[in-house]
Amino acid sequence: MDIYKAERSDLETVKKISHSAINAVYPHYYPVGAVEFFLAHHCDENILRDINKGRVYLLRNDEGCDVGTVTVADNEMTRLFVLPEYQGKGYGGVLIGFAEEKIAEKYDTIRLDASFPAKAIYLRKGYSFVSYHSIECRNGDKLCYDEMIKRIK
């Protein structure tokens, strides 16, 4: 397994991983307007902005396939996704551990916004609930998520 910093040429890979995971998981938890909002949020422009700032990482498995991605912006972990066919195999935990180590180099607290499907995972990893948020989406649908933190020092 190898985690490496994404480059501009990896834009489509990061987008494919992110959008595949969102389309496979989020419709089970959120209404259509919220899923569409989340897909639009992880657009080329936003992904490329983070790649250009050196914030985006890809996880390549032992077979040479890019299976997951995570973005680390200061003390915040974002855009953590694993391709649906590789979920449940520990790749998400590897990405979380990697992001936590990167953040711990400069900060003593990690912050993230947890979607409904990810909240239980983060609670098991020692994160604590801070606050609940809701974004108004198309057709009055809502995208709800929790802000969470973990103290690491």
Image (tube, rainbow, N blue to C red):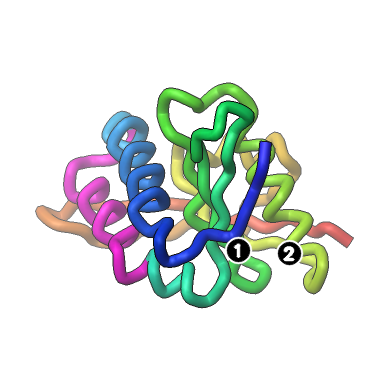
- The magenta segment is 29-46
Q: Is residue 140 left or right of residue 127?
A: left
Would you place residue 134 above or below residue 96 in this image?
below
> Percent x, y for residue 70?
55, 53
Picture quadrant of residue 30? top left
Closer to the camera, 110 or 139? Answer: 110
Q: Residues within 10 Å of mark 2 (few under 14, many from 20)?
A: many
Closer to the camera, 23 or 33? Answer: 23
Task: Answer whether residue 112 is visible to the viewer in this image.
Answer: no
Would you place residue 149 above or below residue 28 in this image?
below
Residues at discs 1 and 2 in contact (Cβ within 8 Å)? yes
> Percent x, y for residue 126?
75, 44
For the C terminus, the image quarter is: bottom right
Q: Main secondary structure of the magenta part?
A: helix
Closer to the camera, 143 or 38? Answer: 38
Inspect the image, locate mark 1, and give the three-letter code of the amino acid beneath it.
Val
Picture quadrant of residue 10? bottom left
> Percent x, y for residue 36?
21, 50
Residue 103, disc: 2
SS of the residue under disc 1: strand
SS of the residue under disc 2: helix
Inspect the image, locate mark 2, and give the three-letter code of the amino acid beneath it.
Ile
Residue assigned mark 1: 72
For the N terminus, the image quarter is: top right
Task: Answer whether residue 104 is visible to the viewer in this image.
Answer: yes
Mark toward the start of the polypeptide (1 vs 2) = 1
